[in-house]
Image (cartoon, grey):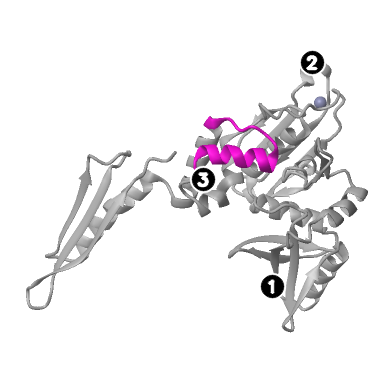
Amino acid sequence: MDFTVLAVFTFEREFVSVRVGLESTIAEVNKVLCEKWTSLSPLSIELSFVRDGMKNLIQSDAELQSLAAYVFAKKLQTVDICVGVVNSSVCNAIVVSEVCNSSSSCVQDEDGEVRQPLKSSYWASLLSSVNQTFSGGAEQFRAAVLKYSIETGFKVKMTKNDKVRVTAVCGLKDETGCKWRVHASCPPRLPSLFRIKRLNSVHSCGSGFRDMKHPPMSKKLVKSLILNKVREKPLIKPKEIVDIFKSDFGVTLNYYFARAGKELALKHIYGDDVLSYSNLRWFVDSVRRTNPGSNVVLEVDPGTQGKFKGCLLAATGKNGNEGRLGMFYLVGHVPRHG
Ligand SMILES: [Zn+2]
């Protein structure tokens, strides 16, 4: 029997939906969650759901698949899954040692101390198989290709790159004939169905060199990785973003990308400056139209820095006795980011 159900994962009052079925794995789910919430790492995620008032942890692929089967059998539309962070005290040396015994994801520094793996440690496996879907469309796929390149050190280049299809080949293809290649596409106007159609995941060009000082990068990738940080702290400085990239992903981020990525993140969170200003003009017209006799003034302060300067919007209206009363005033200020 082949089926999937919609699981809604919630973390800090945000959610992301993922279809899960009998072949889903926690590793796949964790990848999606780490993409969505960059403060998470696969080792820190705790998944749980509540049934009959009891919290039930989801700790294995079998438990995840059983939950999907239960939801399907009950004909429920969705299942809510809480995303928590494992108590950091649990992630101590004992647990880390066990992880180290079973994988090579932990590293020792020069002093012999075990360090937690970087949050980018799973990026090497982001391009896993044909039919892998990127619900965020071409942008999410391009970010995955870049992350793969950063983490593995293999250079890649895009030979096709638009909203409905992206092809990436090995950056050394011409010199070495390396056949590494990934191609993904989606039907027109259905970006959520962006999926890998062809994948040759073997490099014959040699081994990758992880370039920590000059990693491949894009503004959009920086934006996606710092979105939550900017949401928490809109006045975050580019220098702080550079530091986050060093500690979380082990790479030196160029100051230009830190600044440009922050601008994109602010635009994503607060909307476009041009659109906001247009909305303000529309609002003024609307108040005038629906409140005849009222006085609405939109003033622009040329002394304020920023493209649209400071805006002061004030309105007064008539009450039933023809007296004047103040209705509202707004002060807008477009800050200089950076
Ligand atoms: Zn190659």
Image coords of residue 30 (percent x, y) = 75, 55
Q: Nearer the viewer, residue 136 or 226?
A: 226
Q: Secondary structure at mark 3?
A: helix
Q: Nearer the viewer, residue 134 or 272?
A: 272
What amino acid does circle 3 point to?
Ala
What amino acid does circle 2 point to?
Glu
Mark 1 or mark 2: whose residue is earlier in sequence? 1
Real-space Cα separation, disc 3 to disc 1, in angstroms: 33 Å
Circle 3 residue: 265
Left or right: where does residue 166 sit relative to residue 219?
Answer: right
Residue 3: image quadrant is: bottom right
Can you name the residue that lies furthest to the right here?
Answer: 101
Q: Is residue 18 above or below residue 269?
A: below
What amino acid does circle 1 point to?
Gln
Residue 301: image quadrant is: top left
> What crowding class fits label 3: few (fewer than 14 Cα within 10 Å), some (14-19), or many (20 or more)?
many
Q: Say which mark, if any, is on residue 77.
A: 1
Q: Is residue 141 visible?
A: no
Left or right: where does residue 46 sit relative to residue 264?
Answer: right
Left or right: where does residue 312 sit relative to residue 323?
Answer: right
Instruction: Name the residue at 15% across, 64% down.
Output: 316
Range drawn in magenta: 237-256
> What crowding class fits label 2: few (fewer than 14 Cα within 10 Å), some (14-19), or many (20 or more)?
few
